[in-house]
Amino acid sequence: MNWDRIEGNWKQLSGNLREQWGKLTDDRIHIINGKREQLEGALQELYGLSKDEANRQIDEFAKSLHQTKD
């Protein structure tokens, strides 16, 4: 699933996000509001990930949605 579609379906994907990254709270998901850079920063902060690793995990998340949603 491309990021534009993820951003457009952000509220519907909140459960998938919490399943993937359990430290993301509803408030944090609401604040991120589909912005990839915001998600990247949150993952770096909450999980101590490097920027590259956060991006890799986000890419994998998007690919997994593509496999299940498209």
Image (cartoon, rainbow, N blue to C red):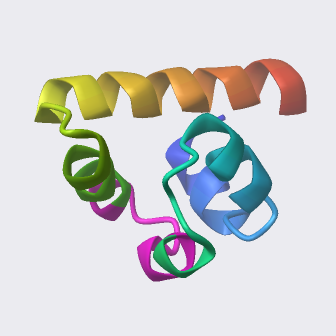
Residue at 40% of width from left, 65% of height from top? Answer: 35
Which stretch appears magenta?
A: 29-38
Q: Is residue 12 magenta?
A: no
Taking 44 as reference, is 23 left or right? right
From the image, which quarter does the N terminus lie in? top right
Q: Quadrant of the C terminus?
A: top right
The chief SS type of the magenta part is helix
Is residue 54 placed above or below 4 in the rendered structure?
above
Residue 39: x %, y % from top left? 37, 56
Q: What residue appears at the point 87 percent right and 33 percent down from the top-left corner?
A: 69
Quadrant housing residue 53? top left
Question: In the image, is residue 47 above or below residue 25?
Answer: above
62 horizontally vs 13: left or right: left
Residue 4 placement (x, y as % from top left):
56, 55
Up-down relation of residue 41 to residue 43 (above or below): below
Query: Front-most of 46 and 42?
Result: 46
Q: On screen, 21 above or below 8? A: above
Q: Is residue 29 visible?
A: yes
Q: Is residue 55 left or right of residue 67?
A: left
In percent of the image, x 86 and y 24: which residue is there?
Answer: 68
Percent x, y of residue 13: 74, 55
